[in-house]
Amino acid sequence: SHSNFVSSRGSIGSVGDHAAMSGFADRVKEYHRTLRPKRGDELSMQQVAMFFGGLYAVIHLLQYFDVWTLLILASIGYVLYRQAQNAMQMVSSSGEDAPVQGSSGAKAKTKAAKGKVHKS
């Protein structure tokens, strides 16, 4: 009776396993389909040119700098770039909100306030 139980259980298990495997195969196919590049996802020639230009620049700079020094300089350059970008965004947004004369008056007030702080 033990072998009969195993065989019946094995057949039930195999049917369950087959359904689970087909579900898994369907999920893998769907995942593979989502990973396939879409028509608009091809790289433009400008992106390819910028990549190779950047690769050339890095290899060229590696003649003069160590890898770690280059990474540190790149990090500092990125932080400075972001700071400049945020500053330009702040200037452009303040220019849109108030007239030009009002923003120059606000700058004069801040300079006067800074002068007061330095005197005390």
Image: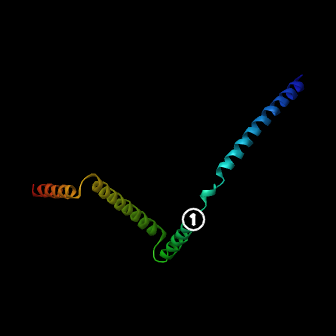
Q: For numbered disc 1, what is the local secondary structure?
A: loop
- Structure colour scheme: rainbow
Nearest the eye: 15 or 29:
29
Position of residue 87 in the picture relative to residue 71 (left or right): left
- The spot of residue 98 in percent (x, y) is 25, 53
Name which residue lies at 77% across and 35% down.
19
Q: Is residue 114 left or right of residue 1?
A: left
Residue 41 image position (x, y, % from top left): 60, 58
Percent of width and height locating residue 104: 20, 59
**Residue at the location (40% across, 65% down)?**
77
Q: Residue at x 80, y 31 (%)?
A: 13
Q: Is residue 25 above or below residue 107?
A: above
* Disc 1 packing (10 Å; few <14; some 14–19; many ≥20): few
Q: Which residue is mark 1?
A: 44
User: In the picture, which quadrant includes the C terminus?
Assistant: bottom left
Percent position (x, y) of residue 63?
49, 77
> Among all residues in the image, which is located at the extreme front?
99
Position above or below: 16 against 112? above
Count of labels in the image: 1
> The residue under label 1 is which amino acid type?
Ser
Residue 38, placed above or below residue 13: below
